Image (cartoon, helix red, strand yellow):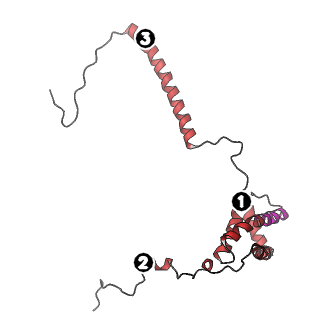
Amino acid sequence: MATLNEPKFDAPIAGQHMTSELGGRPWQQAPQYKTVDDAIEYYLDRMSSEEFTDHLVDVLEMDVPVTAIANNIQLAGVMDGKHTVDVGMLVMPLLMEMIMLVGDMADVKYDSGMENPNKGKTRDTLVTAATTKLKRQIEKKEAMIFDEEDADDDKEKQEPVIEEQEEEPKGLMARRV
């Protein structure tokens, strides 16, 4: 009869599925395209297919910025071992131009991702919002204080002043008289 609490010595080590041998990933190998020209030719061939352009037009119609699409394409090339990171960064402007060309040919209004959306606008950060809120609260308090002073002057003229009584000490250790 087998007991339920016997340790298993043939189980995988924790986190073993997240590691691999050195050189076991495509980006750890020598790149397939070592120069910018070779990588550009690879992308021109790949992006000229009708299937790719159809998918690209669909993505552009979803208002995904061109910069994000180009960055994802070049990052996938790095992950697949097609080229290195530096070659991918040098290819990015060409990828963006090709994506915008496909968008222009399909009459799709696209977001290039290179415009500053806050240009010409004042930035309403949390700090400025908090300071304006605080200023409004201070102005309200000042207005209330001035109104109370006016009201106090009127009360002094009409009502006699009553002396305030001392508050009884409160709490567990307070003395009772």
**Relative image position of residue 174 (x, y in whole percent):** 19, 33
Quick one: label 2, few (<14), some, or many (20+) residues within 10 Å?
few
The numbered mark at residue 174 is none
Taking the image as shown, residue 135 lies to the left or right of residue 79, namely left
Quadrant in the picture for residue 176: top left
Marks 1 and 3: which is nearer the front?
Answer: 1
Q: Residue at x 79, y 62 (%)?
A: 100
Q: Quadrant of the C terminus?
A: top left
- The residue that mark 2 highlights is 14
Q: Is residue 176 above or below residue 82?
A: above
* Residue visible at 76% across and 74% down in the picture: 43
Q: Position of residue 67 (x, y in %)?
A: 71, 61
Question: Which percent across, then down, holds residue 50?
Answer: 80, 74
**Alpha carbon separation for disc pair 1 and 2:** 39 Å
The N terminus, quarter of image = bottom left
Callout 2 amino acid = Ala
Tell me, for residue 65, which label it has, or none: 1
> What's the residue at 78%, 70% (across, down)?
54
- Judge depth for marks 3 and 2 and give the one in front: 2
